[in-house]
Image (tube, rainbow, N blue to C red):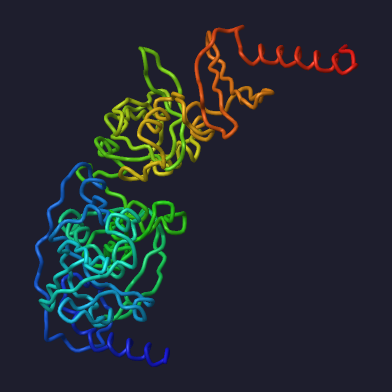
Amino acid sequence: MMKRTILLAGLAFAMLAANAQDNPYIVKTKNVKKTATKAAITAEDIASQDAEPKDFMGKNFRYYSMCDWHDGMRFMVMPEKYDLLVNTFRDANTNKEVSSARLRHHIMVYKGHEDMTNGRVHIKFFCETDNKNYYYELPSGTFDDYCFGKLGVPTLAYLGDVDKARELLMDQPLITRTQFFRIDTEYDGDGYQEVKMPKNKVVTVKAIGVGTRSFPVKIIVEDENGEQFYQNVAMSKTNSGLRDDEFDVDNAKFLFEGSFEFTGAEMVVSTDIKSYINKTVHTKYASDMSTKGSGKTRDVRVPRFTGFIIDEIVGDRNNPGFYTLTLRESETRRIYYKDIVFTEDIPNASKEDYFGYLFGMGEGVAHNTTLETRTAIREGRVIPGMTMEEVEMAVGQSATKVTTSDGITEWMYPRSNSILVVQFNRDGIVIKAGARALGASSVSARRAADQKNSSRRLTGSGISAQ
């Protein structure tokens, strides 16, 4: 049965291969051999979709979670091997499943979602290719629950990134940043061959089309010898189903900046760090930053998933390659400062100093805490109700930890002229926090009291205290 299903899926791909040849989103490197007749049905040439610019990568290729999808967003069905066995869409008129192979290269226009009477949720689409309505039924949960999970709709490659890349990159000179690219081996299929090219090679963009769902933008470039090769890259990661931390060293080439760099000052990415101003970012890891309060600058530990807007970037004259970011925290609007580098080859820079390591695009994931607690953490304050983990995120590791005889745990943080004392109950929840003058430590007092009580108990038992 499985063999028969795979065979039928393969036949469906073969029958529909011709439809891709005149689709403006399907592009191939030159000299690839044609093995199918020309399609009788051609796709219309589609105007590019407008985007809201803020900076080059972040603004032109904005990430849209499903929560932010709007009517009219356009996608192309790009099924992978698994999708041949598990169909994604249903016909809205018949409610019957439709083969992903049959819908291959069809253009789907998002039309919102609908809560059904049976408790299921339908993600609705209009197909430009066959003028039919389809829907994807969420496997479980509400729309809000699902859209925050960055799961998206299987098989769909976001065309907004392709359109914007065509508008900005066609005929532009680029420099290769990796040695590993591909060339097409099938005109009517997805076959390719890995090729190795010199790094830092000047190339020109010759064609841009659809790659895969995970890496939707296929960029074909040509070198000075007329040799063409391509890379499928993720620009905004909209509907790609991939997290930032999945783009490790091996997969870095599947990000645009991992494969290409601009040569002209008018097309700035890594060469002009001012393009990051006004970008919304979040911390992927906890990090030490500086902040100002009551006229003083102090260091604080900023937790993961803290959202910021970059207000200013200033170069450090004493440390070439280092820049100071002025960051406005998204929720509290408090100002923070962080020294970073934009490239990983700067002397004396650690991995934690690298912008791409520390920061991710967008707001990130909110902490599972209350707004009041989250605000206190980001301001470096301790308030009642915090857990021990939240206290460490707010003010770091304590210098001293003591548990008294009555079950109260105290953490002490020396300050310039005082000591911050944080008290926890038996469940590890803050019951009190406050500064005390040096020499008035409650811990010392408690220790003395405990020793005194212990001496009395021992003496009363007939054992003399030394």
Among the 4 quarters of the image, the one containing residue 264: top left
Q: Could you say where residue 291 lies in the image, as x and y percent from the top left?
A: 38, 22
Residue at position x 16%, y 56% from top? 70
Q: Could you say where residue 140 lies in the image, as x and y percent from the top left?
A: 34, 65
**114 sits to left or right of 452:** left
Q: Could you say where residue 44 lies in the image, as x and y percent from the top left?
A: 9, 73
Among the 4 quarters of the image, the one containing residue 18: bottom left
> Is residue 265 positioned above or below 131 on the image?
above
Q: Could you say where residue 315 lies in the image, as x and y percent from the top left?
A: 34, 28
Residue at position x 35%, y 78% from top? 86
Instruction: State which quarter of the image contains the C terminus.
Output: top right
- Observer able to see residue 266: yes
The front one of 129 and 39 is 129
> Is residue 232 positioned above or below 413 on the image?
below
- Observer able to see residue 221: no
**372 sits to left or right of 450:** left
Residue at position x 19%, y 89% from top? 37
**275 sits to left or right of 435:** left
